[in-house]
């Protein structure tokens, strides 16, 4: 492992060090929305349907003949991001088990799972006994999903990745003939390069996917495999049981109860009291052609550029410190000053020319009359993490209800680790054993009785 590789790997997780300074901060989870029904594509999902195994219970939970040994036939999942959707996907694909996804926005992947870069690396977590095997399993599952659901539909592909050290000190820049590109670099001009580019991966170890399209495609397949599966707009606030060993459903904020044999919390940074969110801004811009090399710049703000196969590029950088998230899911404020910093940093790091005809990425004023030259998207999201930086996956500790689970805290690797995490949770919920991932390494039990699931209830006032 090269020093450059270590630096790039640490770039993603360096902000986790600040988590321990925030442990004593008061919990101020963000609120969500309510709603009786939502439309997803051409399909309108009603909250409950008498023809399905899911039915409304009265406020005290009603009667149930379920016990701890009853086979799991329907799972309630709080959170419709990549973890919740992946779990639903493998429940349907491998066990034929239907799910009800409950999300405060009533949409698929409304937060980080729909706004991330979708960068996938096979071996960047090999240094971790816990994350390494999870990452490798998930990398292979991404390929399987692409084969099954159409790679073009979810914009999955293999590509290359390099790191380029850059700076604004002309005396330290690497001298080379004028107009000559850095060796091994596809599109970044590198006039501000402080040294040679380092290869971080090729088509055998690097891939990418469009996160929102991935989540939407998996959920569509869930509905094909288990037509009784449903997506509901709402907020889970507690587990409902008929006995200490029997889960019968999930209570929503409005008092209604959605019936199920197990309950999974996968709400990103809004999942529990030990969760934090690191806010990242990003912008998506046009490219003059399809590019095939992602670039991590080291210096000048450390921007990251993930080129996509639809002639666009996803640019990000300048993360905020980790915080207790108080913004509404899917309504994260986009600060223009951060967007401007990212754009300026990418332009400087990749040595954009005043002659725009020589640039591969197209940054322009939003007032430009040419629609093809405008910035496509400006957005922000929170990457979730636990206080120790390791995801928590498994049964909720300190509860008498054996079928209440949690899966959250995958940091910047949520899209990468989503399929394997969902597969592992599907097996854990249905069979009690995960054959491919050692869930003991991610056990929520490590937090003991201090772990509390914190459904969103309050939010900071909007500015």
Image: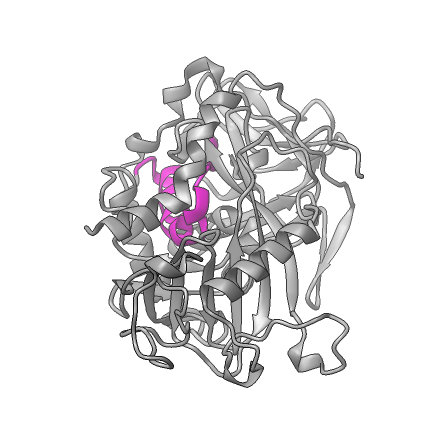
Work out whether 360 lies above or below 295.
Answer: below
Quarter where residue 199 is shown:
bottom left
Is residue 426 in sight in this rendering? Answer: no
Viewer-nearest residue: 308 or 69: 308
Work out whether 41 lies above or below 380.
Answer: below
Q: Position of residue 308 (x, y in %)?
A: 47, 72
Q: Magenta part mainly helix, strand or loop?
A: helix
Viewer-nearest residue: 12 or 206: 12
- For the point 25% across and 39% down, which residue is it? 128
- For the point 36% across and 21% down, which residue is it? 446
Locate the C terminus and report the quarter of the image it occupies: top right
Q: What is the residue that sits farthest to the front in this orientation?
A: 171
Q: Position of residue 331 (x, y in %)?
A: 71, 47
Q: What is the residue that sits farthest to the left in this orientation?
A: 1
Quick check: is 414 in the magenta stretch? yes
Q: Does 74 sit left or right of 169 as displayed? A: right
Q: Position of residue 64 (x, y in %)?
A: 59, 28
Q: Position of residue 254 (x, y in %)?
A: 77, 32
Q: How many marks?
A: 0
- For the point 65% across and 64% down, which residue is it? 377
Q: Does 460 sit left or right of 64 as displayed? A: right
Quick check: is 398 in the magenta stretch? no
Viewer-nearest residue: 4 or 59: 4
Q: Does 370 sit left or right of 289 as displayed? A: right
Residue range highlighted in magenta = 405-433
Scheme of colours in the image: one colour
């Amino acid at each position: 492992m090269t020093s450059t590789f270590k630096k790039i790997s640490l770039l993603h997780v360096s902000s986790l060090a600040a988590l321990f300074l925030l442990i004593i901060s008061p919990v101020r989870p963000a609120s969500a929305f309510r709603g009786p029904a939502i439309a997803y594509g051409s399909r309108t999902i009603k909250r409950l349907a008498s023809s399905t195994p899911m039915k409304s219970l009265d406020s005290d939970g009603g009667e149930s003949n379920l016990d701890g040994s009853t086979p799991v036939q329907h799972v309630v999942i709080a959170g419709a991001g990549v973890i919740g959707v992946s779990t639903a996907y493998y429940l349907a694909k491998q066990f034929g088990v239907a799910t009800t996804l409950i999300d405060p926005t009533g949409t698929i992947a409304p937060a980080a799972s729909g706004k991330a870069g979708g960068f996938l690396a096979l071996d960047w977590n090999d240094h971790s006994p816990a994350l390494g095997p999870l990452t490798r399993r998930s990398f292979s599952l991404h390929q399987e999903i692409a084969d099954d659901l159409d790679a073009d539909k979810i914009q999955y592909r293999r590509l290359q990745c390099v790191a380029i050290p850059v700076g604004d000190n002309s005396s330290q820049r690497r001298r080379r003939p004028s107009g000559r590109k850095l060796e091994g670099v596809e599109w970044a001009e590198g006039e501000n390069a402080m040294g040679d580019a380092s290869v971080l991966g090729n088509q055998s170890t690097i891939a990418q996917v469009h996160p929102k399209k991935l989540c939407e495609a998996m959920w569509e397949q869930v509905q094909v495999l288990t037509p009784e599966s449903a997506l509901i707009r709402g907020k889970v606030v507690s587990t409902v049981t008929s006995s200490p060993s029997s889960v019968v459903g999930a209570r929503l904020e409005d008092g209604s109860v959605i019936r199920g044999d197990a309950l999974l919390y996968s709400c990103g940074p809004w999942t529990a009291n030990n969760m934090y969110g690191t806010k990242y801004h990003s912008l998506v811009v046009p490219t003059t052609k399809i590019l095939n090399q992602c670039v991590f710049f080291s210096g000048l703000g450390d921007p990251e550029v993930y080129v996509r196969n639809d002639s666009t590029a996803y640019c990000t950088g300048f993360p905020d410190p980790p915080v207790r998230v108080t913004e509404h899911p899917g309504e994260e404020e986009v600060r223009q000053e951060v967007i401007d910093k990212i754009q300026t940093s990418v332009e400087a790091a990749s040595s954009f020319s005043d002659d725009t005809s020589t640039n591969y990425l197209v940054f322009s004023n939003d007032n430009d009359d040419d629609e093809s030259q405008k910035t496509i998207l400006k957005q922000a999201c929170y990457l979730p993490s636990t206080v120790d930086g390791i995801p928590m996956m498994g049964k909720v500790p300190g509860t008498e209800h054996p079928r209440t689970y949690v899966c959250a805290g995958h940091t910047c690797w949520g899209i990468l680790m989503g399929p394997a995490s969902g597969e592992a949770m599907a097996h854990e919920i249905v069979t009690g054993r995960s054959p491919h991932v050692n869930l003991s390494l991610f056990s929520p039990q490590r937090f003991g009785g201090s772990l509390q699931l914190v459904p969103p209830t309050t939010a900071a006032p909007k500015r």
